[in-house]
Image (cartoon, rainbow, N blue to C red):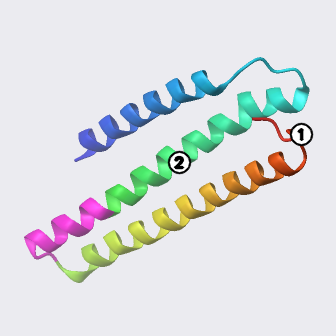
Amino acid sequence: MKKVALLYVLILSRIFSVAAQGIAGATNTVWERVMDQLVNPIFTLLIVITTTYFLWGMLTFIYSLREGNKDSDLNEGKSHMLWGGLGLFIIFSISGIIKLLNSMFDGWFGN
């Protein structure tokens, strides 16, 4: 199970890094460099971590149902899915707010 999770993280990190390289262009201001080199990789890492946390909870929940384990394993899986989903919602909401501010202030917030 841990090997599958590790493989998933490695594949997602490669996909996001290739996508980020295609998006990143020439930067002129310090703020754009901070966004490209610090904020965007942190967002990507947080997305990978929370998605993995959510899927880990889903797998725990499904295996607990399948094997008929006790309620503590089911509750643990539910908890991981809840907090992983909430984390993804927060991350994508912040990303959307940054993109909205970027469009409102004519590119002041970077890419």
Residue shown at the point (22%, 47%) measured from the top left: 1
Q: Which mark, residue 2?
A: none
Q: Nearer the viewer, residue 44 or 103?
A: 103
What type is the residue that disc 1 sits on?
Trp
Start-end of magenta stretch? 58-69
Residue shown at the point (74%, 49%) measured from the top left: 99
Q: Is residue 61 above or below residue 107?
A: below
Q: In the rendering, at what x and y percent does residue 96 appear?
A: 68, 55
Q: Nearer the viewer, residue 24 or 39?
A: 24
The residue that label 1 is drawn on is: 108
- Element class at badge 2: helix
Residue shown at the point (77%, 53%) measured from the top left: 100
Residue shown at the point (81%, 21%) measured from the top left: 27
Q: Nearer the viewer, residue 106 or 16?
A: 106
- Element class at badge 1: loop
Q: Earlier in the sequence, mark 1 or mark 2?
A: 2
Q: In the rendering, at what x and y percent does residue 95 appear?
A: 68, 51
Residue, far top: 26
Are there few (<14), some (14-19), or many (20+) residues within 10 Å of tag 1?
few
The quarter of the displayed image where residue 32 is located: top right
Residue, far bottom: 71
The residue that label 2 is drawn on is: 47
Dot 1 and dot 2 residues touching (CB under 8 Å): no
Q: Is residue 1 magenta?
A: no
